[in-house]
Amino acid sequence: MTPQSDTAVMAPSYPWNRGTFFPHESDVPRKFRDGGGVSLDHILIRGELRPWYGQFAEVFSPVSVRSSEPGKTPRPLVVGRAPLMDEEAAMEALNAAVEAYGQGQGAWPIMSVAQRIEHVQRFLARMRLERESVVELLMWEIGKTWADACKEFDRTCDYIEDTIHELKVLDRRSSRFEIVGGVVAQTRRLPVGVALCMGPYNYPLNETFTTLIPALIMGNTVVFKPAKYGVLLVGPLLDAFRDCFPPGVINVIFGRGRDTVGPLMQSGKVDLFAFIGTHKGASALKQMHPKPHRLKSVLGLDANNPAVVLADADLDLAVRECVAGALSFNGQRCTALKLLFVHDSVAEAFVERLSRAISELAPGMPWEPEVSLTPLPEPGKIEFLTALVDDAKARGARVVNPGGGGVNGTYFHPALLYPVTQEMRIYREEQFGPVVPVVRFSELSEVVEHVRDSNYGQQLSLFGRDPEQIGALIDVMANQVGRINLNAQCQRGPDTLPFNGRKDSAEGTLSVSDALRVFSIRTTVATKASEGNQDLVTDIVRHRHSTILTTDYLF
Ligand code: G3H
């Protein structure tokens, strides 16, 4: 054995590249280790929770585990299994939703708004009881920190409450008659039909429920396909879905999109398509529908949100917001800041402070306190991010922060790349992960050109203090993106604000109130204001001959 020489070069040690970074297998909660983890082995169709006898897919955690044998690399942890439904089972789920809708005459679409609200309230009460299990699965399935997982759960509950409140407001407004140009009319918002709701893995609960709940509460029946990762966490909610909604109103499909969702779209029986994911995935699915004009879509898609740090920006604030904007949940947010444009005059100082701020973020396991950087759930992601970093380095950028771009199994340490130029892949491609590219600019026209040429148009952030300059930039950028954030990172919330995008970034607008509109269609009952018609309408309303044409309203 050769003794270690004083001059030997040691690989720097960071918290994330130590052998103890991943937990020992004995530290993993028992339910996630013995016998292969949590078994999601029932499917919800037609109001029945049926045992699934078909194939299953193993569910891997981004968290690997160390074994007792010394020198062995940590192994991927299987945290459970979920049904791999096939076309036949998926079609049965869809047909159950179609029957429950019953051409608009099913129990659910004709139910009064007040009663539908009661069902959703019952569901919310049951959902709250599952907080702990859902939060735990969010950590183990997608690597979301405990604090963020709690936030996701609570935000979803708030969203449901706000939706109920907003629906009452909407319903009160629609209970009135209007008289225009000699016509008496009442307009109500009614369901559209059968909705297919699909959410993303980064917010498998929240983003899915921001379409699922409005779709349900407006009287549509639903086929719900959970995200690619974050599937097991639906398990604790299945009983509540079954118990709180009439049979067939909500049906859940698990499995590969190509085996399940494609055939649903091809059947032409989907009326509403709510999808949060890539624009390529959305386009492919939309094109499968035989009657695209009948398909109403609401889509939240890719984004490549830039930040623009102007010469007079408050750099401490800009760094704080950019770190949170670029690296919350390891940059796996559609609203994350993906490209930072920084004025020449402050670029060096900004990059230095940003590097320091990144070094202060704690890497670790999702359940550890204070941790904000965690392992990534997507297979192939580490290689993809490494390739982006290598490409940028080969074209003249350097990784500024210590250990940036380093890898330990499923963990990728954030890489602050500087200076990034147009030739690099990272300038155009959405990383959806912990790579933070900084571009220097001297003329604002360079930034404006980038935003105009981009295929995406979700949001952007402006950091600066000069009202004249910021005002002018707002005017230039307002027709390029859906939201401009001043001295703040990009984000979807508060959920009452419109969430949308231009170009390939979205179709339709979501917010608590917009979602109710997206998942419904206005239907008007109108008559000429003659005495006979007035008597007719009065009689219908007074003697409750219609559940639609009424003046009832909700408190
Ligand atoms: O992934 C996209 C989410 O809608 C982002 O929501 O900005 O509140 O994290 P957030």
Image (cartoon, rainbow, N blue to C red):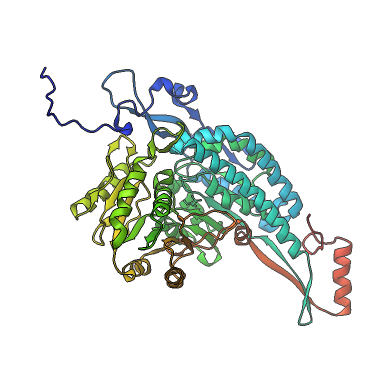
Observer-nearest of 371 and 131: 371
Residue 204: x %, y % from top left? 50, 44
Which image quadrant for residue 304? bottom left
In the picture as drawn, the residue positioned furthest to the bottom comes out as 181
> Total marks drawn?
0
Q: Is residue 528 left or right of residue 11?
A: right
Quadrant of image for the C terminus = bottom right
Report whether residue 111 is seen: no
- Taking the spot 74% from the left edge, 65% from the top edge, the residue there is 174
Which image quadrant for residue 284? bottom left
Residue 537: x %, y % from top left? 85, 70
Q: Is residue 552 left or right of residue 360?
A: right
Residue 267: x %, y % from top left? 52, 56
Q: Is residue 181 left or right of residue 375?
A: right
- Taking the spot 37% from the left edge, 42% from the top edge, the residue there is 378
- Taking the spot 13% from the left edge, 26% from the top edge, the residue there is 6
Q: Is residue 402 left or right of residue 185?
A: left
Q: Is residue 481 above or below residue 235?
A: below
Observer-nearest of 66 and 77: 66
Q: Is residue 488 above or below residue 200?
A: below
Residue 422: x %, y % from top left? 26, 62
Observer-nearest of 212 and 495: 495
- Taking the spot 69% from the left edge, 52% from the top edge, the residue there is 164
Q: Is residue 229 above or below residue 213?
A: above
Quadrant of image for the N terminus = top left
Which image quadrant for residue 372? top left
Report whether residue 511 is seen: yes
Observer-nearest of 492 and 472: 472
